[in-house]
Image: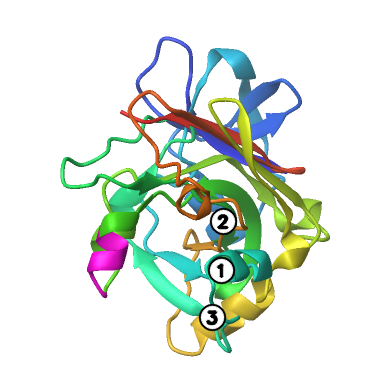
């Protein structure tokens, strides 16, 4: 099942519903949200109005997640391109709730940032009781100059809008092998990242277990599982993002997000 938050045609009031093929069908209760469904794991309630998928505006499935966890150096090939050893334990950092953005929202580059980079990532979406409710696609947008200058990555990773994600949440029952999915990232049509989640050092359940050792995970929390090799910082010459660039990230079975840089 694919859970989405969207604006119906001609409306500025967000609705939530399920995506079926080329349409999205709203929940009967107009105020019910995707987060409500994540909390209850009740996917089979009655549905309401249907809209053509290409006529709605998709929003972030959960507008402001309570917590967004990021994981560093979690693909073997990415660690290698950074000249780093594979970590013994997951490297965890935080993005702010205000980082969350719709899947097609333009990312604004702050004036202080001069080395903006992309990171295509598989996202874990939490349900109740520290269970994995589903998966999505995200760009862990990163300010490399701030990341290298400042020992804490909050500003480099957590700027407003630095986490476009979606396009919807695919429930875990539809993703039997999350560690065997193809992930691709294109910038202006050029293929930059092409990898399998089988290259993950720490898989989804291992990450959930590790974070849960100290932090209570709640429904709607996100865990960005890390990026594969092929980021702009590691290219020769380096290829950072500039205004007008378009980034498209797609994960097998989960859909794609596509956003521009302002």
Quick one: SS at disc 3?
A: loop
User: Where is residue 154 drawn, in percent x and y?
Assistant: 27, 65
Neighbour tally class for label 3: few under 14, some 14-19, many 20 plus, Cα within 10 Å? many
Left or right side of 19 for 61: left
Asked if residue 204 shows in the view, the reply is yes
The numbered mark, 1 or 3, whose residue comes first in the sequence reads 3
Evaluate if marks 2 and 1 touch, with contact meaning CB atoms under 8 Å apart.
yes
Q: Kindly report the distance in space between the C-alpha atoms of the residues bearing marks 2 and 3.
A: 25 Å
Quick one: SS at disc 1?
A: helix
Relative to 208, residue 36 above or below: above
User: Where is residue 14 drawn, in percent x and y?
Assistant: 41, 29
Segment colored magenta: 146-151
Asked if residue 52 shows in the view, the reply is no
Q: Residue furthest left?
A: 112
Looking at the rendered structure, which numbered label has been put on residue 128? 1
Q: Which residue is mark 2?
A: 38
Relative to 244, residue 40 above or below: below
Left or right side of 18 for 62: left
Q: Nearer the viewer, residue 2 or 189?
A: 189
Question: Residue at coordinates 47% horizontally, 12% vertically from top-left?
Answer: 9
Q: Which residue is mark 3?
A: 90
User: Where is residue 171 drawn, in percent x and y?
Assistant: 70, 52
């Amino acid at each position: 099942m694919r859970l989405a938050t969207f604006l119906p045609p001609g409306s500025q009031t967000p609705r939530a519903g399920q995506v079926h093929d080329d349409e999205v069908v709203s929940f009967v209760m107009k105020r019910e949200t995707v987060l409500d469904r994540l909390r209850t794991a009740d996917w089979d309630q009655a549905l309401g109005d249907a809209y053509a998928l290409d006529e709605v505006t998709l929003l972030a499935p959960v507008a402001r997640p309570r917590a967004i966890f990021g994981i560093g150096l979690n693909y073997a090939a990415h660690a290698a391109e950074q000249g780093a050893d594979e970590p013994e334990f997951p490297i965890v950092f935080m993005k702010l709730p205000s980082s969350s953005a719709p899947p097609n929202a333009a990312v604004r580059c702050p004036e202080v940032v001069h080395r903006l980079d992309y990171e295509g990532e598989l996202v874990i979406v939490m349900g109740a009781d520290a269970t994995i409710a589903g998966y999505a696609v995200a760009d862990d947008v990163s300010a490399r100059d701030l990341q290298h200058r400042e020992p804490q990555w909050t500003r480099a990773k957590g700027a407003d809008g630095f986490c476009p994600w979606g396009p919807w949440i695919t429930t875990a029952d539809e993703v039997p092998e999350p560690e065997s999915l193809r992930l691709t990232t294109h910038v202006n049509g050029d293929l930059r990242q092409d990898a399998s989640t089988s290259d993950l050092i720490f898989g989804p359940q291992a990450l959930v277990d590790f974070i849960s050792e100290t932090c209570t995970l709640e429904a709607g929390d996100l865990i960005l599982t890390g990026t594969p090799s092929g980021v702009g910082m590691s290219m020769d010459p380096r290829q950072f993002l500039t205004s007008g660039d378009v980034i498209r990230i797609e994960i097998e079975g989960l859909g794609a997000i596509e956003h521009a840089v302002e």
